Image: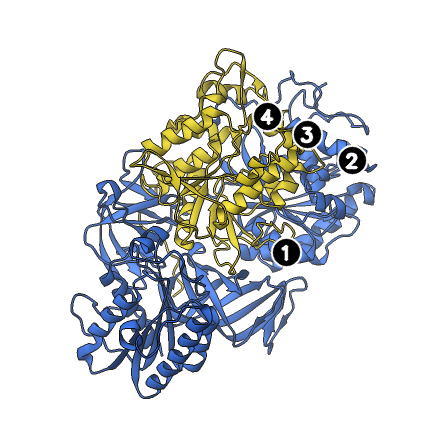
Chain colours: A blue, B yellow
């Protein structure tokens, strides 16, 4: 007995009794698997299902999977077995809530991924949890989606999370949405009740600038209007849920926009005689061709694309949005992770150190005025200071409040953020992908946002740091940290050399200059104590106008924090290289455990950078820093 | 200020198909991992998934694999898997490292020795061996390309980023994974409190003593894997194919706990035809893996404690 014996939308499934299995006939053709040529199928579309807790999202997906025959038998057997053993009635939702914890609590705790296909295309269904504590999981699911199903319970109507989720969808950029009014049996499957919902919902969605593609009355448990048209609600003539899914348009990647590629890394793998220097990244929008003139922001450096590179295929002559690519440059300019690659003849991005942004906060710890966070936009990573909270919007009531000093979990706010150094981006109204950022608080991504506007734009840096350029170091403590062999002393000397003729006072504190008076010590305690003593000395030298470059072993995070706390201008530079390189440079095997800094101002991979490149990186950072403060 | 950004040229040259889409995302994730973790390793089980992952690394890094490949050798792996591992290591100039729970093996605390049940055996020979190999407490054996054999690795630095080939469609608990999934010092996975992940931003910051698992293959299905193997002509271990006995392995593990499936698919193309035919549609991919069945959530319990 096949569930699906005819056309998808007109045949009703056999009603399932407690024992009945929907797929006990393997031989009947299944229209959802009968795809002649998968190459004809579009790339997979991500669909997120959101809504208030207990409104039946997981049941709807479970039932859709069952009715379309997309389930592996093992899964259904496993869940049914477990239900039988624990004397619980089988529910379709259990198919998704496959984790033990969830079965115990009866709520979905994460955005489960489910694969699914119709004759039209493949889907990746993301089941987002409705429970308020798990909003961050809903955001995780929704951000991957191209379209959304918003589920609500006909018996309960529009609830807090219905509004919150709809608002977040609009902020996350999910514009295609269908509303599923579930449990219609609770209102007697009446058309008047449904029409009332549809009016109320339409009005609410209009306030947040969203237009649903369809509003569909369903009974998830029985499958009415999911894969099959309902016979009990014959008054409804709109699409079923499956039809609504197939009607969503796949948002082709942003090929139409200007070229934007955040630089992930610049690779130079020298083994086997490979001398390519490849700028690598994933294209957010637009396209890139061999010969194009590229400009990197915020540095403003420019050159032409010499070649596109690829492994195990013919090197392409063009690469477009959505592609992870790599290219070599006609001239060897120094660019690094965090810059935004653009094209010279296209609209430029914005470069700024102060931005106005809309933010949603997910962290358990509130977003506090005056505190510092790490902001990550594209591949750029910068220390960010929350300067002003303009207004806070309660995402469930959409009321706005001014004069707040903190934004708590699940709230949305408009804020002004000051950045430690300039980054490149686009305004949300102009180009969504490169306007999006996250805020990291204490190792955790705790919020997301979009840049609305730049408040003070820094102009791209034009100064050269080429060979022999003289650089003035202002009074400050430049603390170089890293394991032995990372290249601290060499870099300190390089920096001091560049500053020598600038008139700046520069002091180096490293093993060569202070080793005799302040011996390195054997134990961890001795090493820490030495780091603290030298930190104090450095802060005094700084107070008298010197730029102090410290390059000693400082394995202890606590000691470095102390150094930061007593200096007035402190720049922590973390030097690192692969273990193989460090060992080749003489790092001892019994070295004291090194605690890498959590948020240094600058990280340098001295295994991949030459000394000149590392030095140039530091100077570029210092120049940007000086230009803004 | 208010102009909408539109480039002058706008016609799309070629459509990205779904394998391209998967490849691009995986490559992006691999590069993010490489940029974020100075002590990065990739787990290589020798199976089809982690071998596709290895291939994707060569894509991401333009023919290079700039990180060690860690293999947990339970000593009960099917011998052909080990031969295949060492052949690719030599041909592709890979940094291959293996580790094992030598104490448990010496004390015969294994299921094949008849002293513990399957789950405990997995716990000893995989989970614990993996934990100790990643942390550097356990011995690491590195393939020395000059000597052509394994030597004890002098690097005992803990790996802070570990790339794993788990796929969401394999099994329930894996569908809950993040691309970047922080683990505690004891390798534990806190499923209820995972970091949010959106807009290509991942949990690349991590507290001292913790590490991050990276899952570039999360969105791939079994069929995707085989179609990609075919498209790219990736070499795979012959255990996946029928050698004339009318059976093949669909998922590879230790010989005492891995069963073959009835199949006469002799090559990649025939496996793809077989998968598309729906012959296995109602049989879970890991159904031949006995440890999954030993309690209500066998693999899930293992994964919470650090199993791959």
Q: Is residue A43 left or right of residue A90?
A: left
Do we see residue A2 in this rendering? yes
In this view, the residue in front, A437 or A573, is: A573
Q: Which residue is tagged 4?
A: B256
Chain label for disc 1: A
Q: Is residue A283 left or right of residue A406?
A: left
| Helix, strand or loop at mark 4 | helix
Have a look at marks 1 and 3 and say if they share a chain.
yes
| Helix, strand or loop at mark 2 | helix
Q: Quadrant of the C terminus of chain A?
A: bottom left
Q: Quadrant of the N terminus of chain A?
A: top right
Quarter of the figure with residue B116: top right
The answer for how far apart the CA atoms under marks 1 and 3 are is 29 Å
Marker disc for residue A135: 1
Marker disc for residue A67: 3
The answer for how far apart the CA atoms under marks 1 and 2 are is 28 Å
Chain label for disc 3: A
Have a look at marks 3 and 2 and say if they share a chain.
yes
| Label 2, residues with CA under 10 Å away: few <14, some 14-19, many ≥20 | some
Q: First in sequence, mark 1 or 3: give its number.
A: 3
Front label number (1 vs 3) = 1
Query: x, y (%) of residue A295?
Result: 27, 57
The answer for how far apart the CA atoms under marks 1 and 4 are is 43 Å
Chain label for disc 4: B
Q: Which residue is tagged 2?
A: A83
Position above or below: A124 against A39: below
Front label number (3 vs 2) = 2
Query: x, y (%) of residue A510?
Result: 30, 73
| Label 1, residues with CA under 10 Å away: few <14, some 14-19, many ≥20 | many
């Amino acid at each position: 007995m096949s569930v699906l014996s005819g056309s998808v939308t007109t045949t009703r499934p056999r009603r399932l009794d407690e024992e009945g299995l929907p797929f006990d006939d393997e031989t009947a053709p299944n229209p959802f698997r009968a795809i002649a040529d998968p190459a004809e199928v579009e790339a997979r579309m991500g669909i997120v299902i959101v809504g208030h807790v207990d409104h039946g999202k997981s049941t709807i997906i479970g039932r859709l999977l069952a009715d379309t025959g997309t389930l592996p038998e093992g899964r259904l057997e496993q869940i049914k077995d477990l239900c039988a053993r624990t004397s619980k009635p089988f529910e379709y939702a259990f198919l998704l809530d496959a984790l033990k914890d969830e079965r115990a609590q009866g709520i979905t705790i994460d955005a489960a991924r489910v694969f699914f296909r119709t004759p039209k295309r493949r889907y990746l269904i993301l089941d987002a949890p409705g429970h308020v504590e798990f909003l961050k999981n809903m955001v995780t699911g929704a951000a991957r989606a191209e379209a959304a199903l918003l589920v609500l319970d006909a018996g309960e109507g529009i609830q807090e999370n219905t509004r919150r989720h709809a608002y977040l969808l609009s902020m996350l950029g999910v514009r295609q949405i269908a509303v599923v009014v579930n449990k219609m049996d609770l209102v007697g499957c009446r058309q008047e009740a449904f029409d009332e919902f549809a009016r109320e919902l339409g009005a609410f969605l209009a306030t947040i600038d969203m237009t649903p593609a369809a509003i569909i009355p369903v009974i998830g448990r029985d499958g009415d209007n999911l894969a099959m048209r309902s016979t009990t609600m014959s008054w409804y003539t709109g699409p079923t849920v499956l039809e609504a899914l197939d009607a969503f348009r796949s948002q082709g990647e942003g090929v139409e926009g200007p070229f934007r590629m955040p630089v992930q890394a610049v690779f130079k793998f020298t083994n086997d005689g490979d001398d390519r220097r490849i700028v690598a990244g994933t294209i957010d929008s637009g396209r890139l061709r061999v010969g194009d003139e590229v400009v990197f922001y915020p540095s403003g450096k420019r050159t032409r694309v010499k070649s596109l590179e690829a492994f195990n295929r013919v090197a392409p002559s063009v690469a477009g949005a959505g592609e992870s690519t790599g290219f070599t440059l006609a001239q060897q300019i120094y660019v690094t992770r965090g810059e935004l690659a653009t094209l010279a003849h296209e609209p430029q991005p914005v470069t700024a150190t102060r931005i106005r942004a809309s933010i949603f906060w997910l962290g358990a710890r509130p977003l506090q005025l005056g505190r510092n966070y790490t902001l990550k936009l594209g591949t750029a990573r910068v220390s960010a200071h929350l300067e002003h909270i303009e207004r806070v919007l309660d995402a469930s009531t959409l009321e706005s409040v001014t004069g707040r000093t903190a934004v708590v979990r699940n709230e949305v706010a408009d804020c002004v953020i000051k950045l430690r150094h300039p980054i490149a981006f686009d305004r949300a109204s102009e180009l969504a992908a490169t306007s999006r950022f996250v805020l990291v608080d204490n190792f955790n991504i705790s919020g997301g946002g979009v840049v609305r506007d730049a408040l003070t734009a820094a102009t791209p840096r034009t100064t050269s740091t080429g060979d022999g350029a003289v650089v003035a170091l202002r009074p400050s403590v430049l603390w170089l940290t890293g394991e032995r062999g990372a290249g601290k002393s060499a870099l300190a000397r390089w920096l001091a050399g560049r500053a020598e003729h600038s008139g700046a006072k520069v002091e180096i504190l490293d093993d060569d200059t202070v080793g005799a008076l302040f011996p390195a010590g054997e134990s961890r305690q001795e090493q820490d104590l030495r780091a603290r003593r030298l930190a104090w000395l450095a802060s005094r030298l700084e107070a008298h106008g010197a730029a102090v470059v410290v390059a000693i072993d400082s394995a202890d995070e606590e000691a470095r924090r102390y150094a930061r706390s007593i200096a007035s201008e402190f720049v922590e530079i973390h030097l690192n290289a692969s273990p193989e390189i460090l060992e080749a440079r003489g790092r001892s095997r019994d070295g004291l455990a090194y605690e890498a800094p959590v948020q240094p101002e600058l990280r340098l991979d001295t295994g991949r950078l030459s000394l000149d490149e590392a030095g140039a990186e530091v100077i570029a950072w210092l120049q940007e820093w000086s230009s803004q403060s | 200020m208010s102009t909408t950004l539109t480039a002058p040229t706008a016609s799309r040259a070629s459509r990205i198909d779904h394998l391209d889409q998967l490849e691009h995302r995986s490559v992006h994730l691999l590069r993010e991992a490489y940029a974020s973790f100075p002590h990065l390793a990739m787990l290589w089980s020798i199976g089809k998934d982690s071998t596709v992952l290895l291939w994707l690394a060569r894509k991401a890094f333009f023919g290079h694999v700039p990180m060690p490949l860690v293999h947990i050798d339970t000593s009960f792996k099917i011998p052909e898997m080990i031969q295949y591992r060492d052949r690719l290591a030599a041909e592709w100039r890979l940094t291959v490292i293996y580790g094992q729970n030598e104490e448990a093996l010496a004390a015969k605390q294994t299921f094949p020795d008849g002293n513990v049940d399957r789950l405990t055996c997995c716990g000893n020979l995989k989970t614990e061996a993996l934990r100790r190999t990643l942390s550097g407490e356990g011995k690491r054996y590195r393939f020395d390309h000059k000597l052509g054999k394994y030597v004890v690795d002098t690097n005992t630095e803990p790996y802070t980023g570990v790339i794993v080939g788990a796929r969401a469609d394999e099994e329930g608990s894996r569908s809950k994974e993040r691309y970047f999934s922080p683990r505690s010092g004891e390798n534990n996975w806190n499923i209820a409190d995972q970091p949010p992940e959106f807009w290509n931003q991942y949990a690349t910051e991590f507290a001292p003593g913790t590490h991050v698992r990276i899952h570039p293959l999360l969105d791939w299905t079994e069929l995707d894997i085989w179609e990609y193997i075919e498209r790219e002509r990736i070499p795979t271990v012959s255990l996946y194919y029928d050698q004339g006995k009318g059976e093949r392995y669909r998922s590879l593990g230790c010989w005492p706990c891995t069963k073959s499936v009835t199949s006469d698919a002799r090559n990649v193309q025939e496996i793809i035809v077989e998968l598309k035919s729906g012959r296995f549609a109602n049989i879970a991919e890991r159904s031949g893996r006995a440890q999954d069945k030993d309690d209500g959530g066998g693999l899930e319990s293992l994964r919470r404690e650090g199993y791959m």
